[in-house]
């Protein structure tokens, strides 16, 4: 919809993009464009401006996110589902399909799921996939029959990383959603959860509510309520992994909060009857421990240094036999979140007898997303195959 021949200023003057681009393409990434370049074309910006980690500005990613927002506003192929809004019982109302939230709210109004609209295109991610999400190898992990089924799909809720400080919602959200729908046959949801200074348990409550919502409205989303996966990257991985053993406690906290908001009684009853436990967990270079070899930023941003939380939120200390099946990977040269986090998780899963596949690849560092240019290039193929059998 948008092209590199258009200027940054021209694109940002479009209402939905100006209002909401930071929800899909992180606002801190936009800061890499200096004001004097706003009238440059995106092609010029790509040549002259660079991301913080040294690569050219991600013009293609920015244009894709802007186009997805226009798909949402004009064609209603996508929708933002507000989870804590007391009107969220209105999932059946047409007005909900037209809501586009402001970016960077970081409060209950900014907690939402981004997904294909079941009224228009329930697997819109699969049908709007950019080339960057397509693997450079044939994907055969899931059978053609499963890919073509149109009802009772498995669901996946995707939690981008960002150290509980920001959310990398494109490379660790949108792109993974595209891969999961197109090549895995899933119905995908990208979760925007609260970050610092919203400390534990607030982010975990957001994910618990997301799982409860998708399960409660399984008929509407045409998904299997007994097949809901969660996938998280880095701190988003910690979010998924910790919610999985705290789900009962978190469900009660969610129900208490919803009761205060006087949510529709029928919806509240549906949530009371819906488990917050995921049926499987996918983890990309995850934060696991807050005890040793941990990511200090994630720990501080989640715990606010509250006594006892380091132990309580160190996942490897909490794994029991009833923990969901896990796929996880990390890169050995990760200088942000040590790969030892994944190794310790694997030991805990093995000791508890939980089905799992944990992989350590030699190179790729951190934050690689689908990682097609790294040694971990086939991690998503391995994960799809693992969850096809577990």
Image (spheres, rainbow, N blue to C red):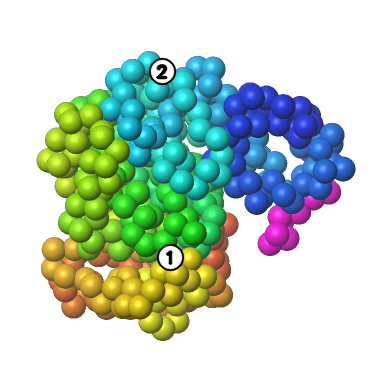
Q: Quadrant of the C terminus?
A: bottom left
- Residue underneath mark 2: 95
Q: Quadrant of the N terminus?
A: top right
Residue 333 lies in magenta, yes or no? no
How many tags in the picture? Answer: 2
- Tell me where residue 221 sits by quadrant: top left
- Tell me where residue 284 sits by quadrant: bottom left
Please tell me which residue lies in front, 64 or 278: 278
Give the secondary structure at mark 1. Answer: helix
Q: Sort mark 2 into few (<14), some (14-19) or many (20+) by Cα contacts within 10 Å.
A: few
Residue 101: percent from left, percent from top: 51, 33
Residue at image point 41% right, 39% down: 112
Please tell me which residue lies in front, 309 or 256: 256
Please tell me which residue lies in front, 109 or 7: 109
User: What is the chief secondary structure element of the magenta stretch?
Assistant: loop
Indicate which disc residue 302 carries: 1
| Contact (Cβ within 8 Å) of mark 2 with mark 1 | no
Q: Residue furthest right?
A: 36
Residue 138: percent from left, percent from top: 43, 45
Residue 364: percent from left, percent from top: 55, 66
Q: Sort mark 1 into few (<14), some (14-19) or many (20+) by Cα contacts within 10 Å.
A: many
Tell me, yes or no, if residue 149 can be seen here: no
Tell me, yes or no, if residue 111 can be seen here: yes
Residue at image point 50% right, 47% down: 106
User: What's the magenta region?
Assistant: 48-55
**In the visual, does 78 lie left or right of 20?**
left
Give the secondary structure at mark 2. Answer: helix
Residue 107: percent from left, percent from top: 46, 46
**318 is higher (above) or lower (below) than 258:** below
Residue at image point 43% right, 75% down: 305
Q: Residue furthest bottom?
A: 292
- The answer to which of marks 2 and 1 sits earlier in the sequence is 2
């Amino acid at each position: 919809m948008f092209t590199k021949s258009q200027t940054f200023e021209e694109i940002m003057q479009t209402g939905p993009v100006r209002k909401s681009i930071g929800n899909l393409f992180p606002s801190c990434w936009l800061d890499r464009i200096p004001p004097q370049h706003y009238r440059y074309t995106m092609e010029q910006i790509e040549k002259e401006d660079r991301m913080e980690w040294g690569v050219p500005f991600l013009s293609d990613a920015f244009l894709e996110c802007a186009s997805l927002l226009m798909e949402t506003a004009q064609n209603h192929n996508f929708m933002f589902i507000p989870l804590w809004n007391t009107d969220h019982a209105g999932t059946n109302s047409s007005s909900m399909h037209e809501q586009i939230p402001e970016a960077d709210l970081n409060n209950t109004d900014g907690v939402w799921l981004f997904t294909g609209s079941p009224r228009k295109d329930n697997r819109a991610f699969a049908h709007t996939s950019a080339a960057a999400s397509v693997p450079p190898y044939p994907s055969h992990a899931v059978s053609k029959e499963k890919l073509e089924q149109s009802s009772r799909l498995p669901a996946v809720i995707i939690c981008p990383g960002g150290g509980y400080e920001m959310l990398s919602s494109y490379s660790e959200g949108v792109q993974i959603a595209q891969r999961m729908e197109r090549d895995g046959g899933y119905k995908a949801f990208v979760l925007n959860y609260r970050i610092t200074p919203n400390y534990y348990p607030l982010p975990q409550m957001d994910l618990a509510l997301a799982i409860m919502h998708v399960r409660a409205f399984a008929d509407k989303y045409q998904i299997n309520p007994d097949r809901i996966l969660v996938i998280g990257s880095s701190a988003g991985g910690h979010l998924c992994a910790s919610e999985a053993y705290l789900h009962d406690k978190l469900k009660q906290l969610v129900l208490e909060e919803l009761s205060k908001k006087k949510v529709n009684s029928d919806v509240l009853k549906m949530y009371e009857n819906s488990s917050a436990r995921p049926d499987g967990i996918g983890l990309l270079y995850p934060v696991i421990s807050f005890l040793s070899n941990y990511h200090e930023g994630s720990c501080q941003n989640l715990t606010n240094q509250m006594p006892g939380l380091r132990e309580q939120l160190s996942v490897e200390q909490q794994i029991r036999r009833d923990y969901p099946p896990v796929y996880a990977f990390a890169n050995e040269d990760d200088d942000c979140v040590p790969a030892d986090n994944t190794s310790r998780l694997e030991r805990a899963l093995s000791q508890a007898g939980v089905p799992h596949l944990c992989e350590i690849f030699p190179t790729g560092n951190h934050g690689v997303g689908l990682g097609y240019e790294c040694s971990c290039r086939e991690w998503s193929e391995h994960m799809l195959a693992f969850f096809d059998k577990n």
